[in-house]
Structure formats: C-alpha cells, structure tokens
Image (cartoon, rainbow, N blue to C red):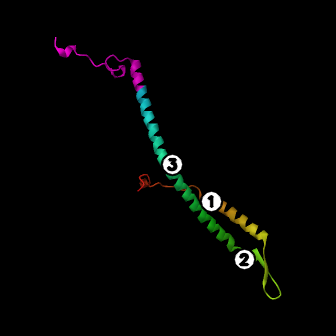
Amino acid sequence: MSKIYSRPRIRLPIIFQAKFESKENRKKKKMLLIFTVMLIAIITAKTILEAVLPIFDTLCTDKAKSLATIISNEQATVVMREHSYEELFSVEKDNSGNIIMIKSNVSPINEIISDIAVKIQKEIDSQGRDDVEIAIRKFYRI
C-alpha cells in the first residue's frame, strides 16, 4: 500500500462536514449565519451612530441658537417701536436744571418684557421644523 493512503487524515469539525449533515445541523448553521449577520449589522449601526450623533447635536444646537437670536432681536425691535423712552423713565430735576433722580416706571417695563417674551414664543412655535444637514466632509475632519 502506498503512503498516500495511510497518512493521518485532517478531521474537520462537524460544522464543516456537509456529507452527513442532518436537517437539524443545517438549521443550526442557518441560525448561526443569521445571528452573525445581525451582530455585524448592530455593531456597524452602533459605530456609525457614535460617530454621527456628536456632529448632529452640535449642528442642531448651533441652528437653534441662531434661530432664537434672530427671532428675539426681531421681536424686541417690533415691541420697542410701540414705546418711547419717556414712557419708561422719568427724570427729576432741581430748580437750577440739574438732574436729581431718574425713576423707572416699572409697569410699562414689565409690559414690554412680557410682550417680547410672548411674541418670541409665538414666533418660535410658528417656525415648525427646520432641516439640519450634515456635510460628509465633517466625518473625515476635512
């Protein structure tokens, strides 16, 4: 007999032997394959989300601050057009014309503050949704 036939054989694990595979083993292989694919998909999604979320949070925060600043400045200007400086403060002078005291009129000031706040909130509520875009170059830090 030749040496080629008497050499030790490589014994493969049962998973890789297709010749005598039963239905149960095929089901196990399919389940293992599905589990592996799902695990890889979950790990990939988690990695991508960890990379994207900080960029997205920063962009959303900047967009919200910008929008709030623009709206508050516009509404403050609109409300202040309706009022004059003489409404807000009264100046008391002595006999020779020197200023003794400047008094603030709290009632009109509180009215202005509340009007500005209400108008800002109404404007922000009417804005609705706004799109935030992420440039692909941000992922590569270019």
Residue 131: x percent and y percent? 52, 55
Q: Secondary structure at mark 1?
A: helix
Indicate the quadrant where residue 11 lies: top left
Query: Closest to the observer: 97 or 121?
Result: 97
Where are the magenta residues, as a range? 1-30
Residue 12: x percent and y percent? 32, 20
> Neighbour class for label 3 at 10 Å: few (<14), some, many (≥20)?
few
The answer to whether 126 appears left or right of 111 in the picture is: left
Indicate the quadrant where residue 41 lies: top left
Q: Secondary structure at mark 3?
A: helix
- Circle 3 sits on which residue? 53
* Cα–Cα span, label 1 and label 2: 28 Å
Residue at x 63% of width, y 65% of height: 72
Residue 114: x percent and y percent? 72, 64
Residue at x 44% of width, y 40% of height: 44
The numbered mark, 2 or 3, whose residue comes first in the sequence reads 3
- Circle 2 sits on which residue? 85
Vertical relation: 71 (above or below) 58: below
Q: Nearer the viewer, mark 3 or mark 1?
A: 3
Query: Closest to the observer: 75 or 1?
Result: 1
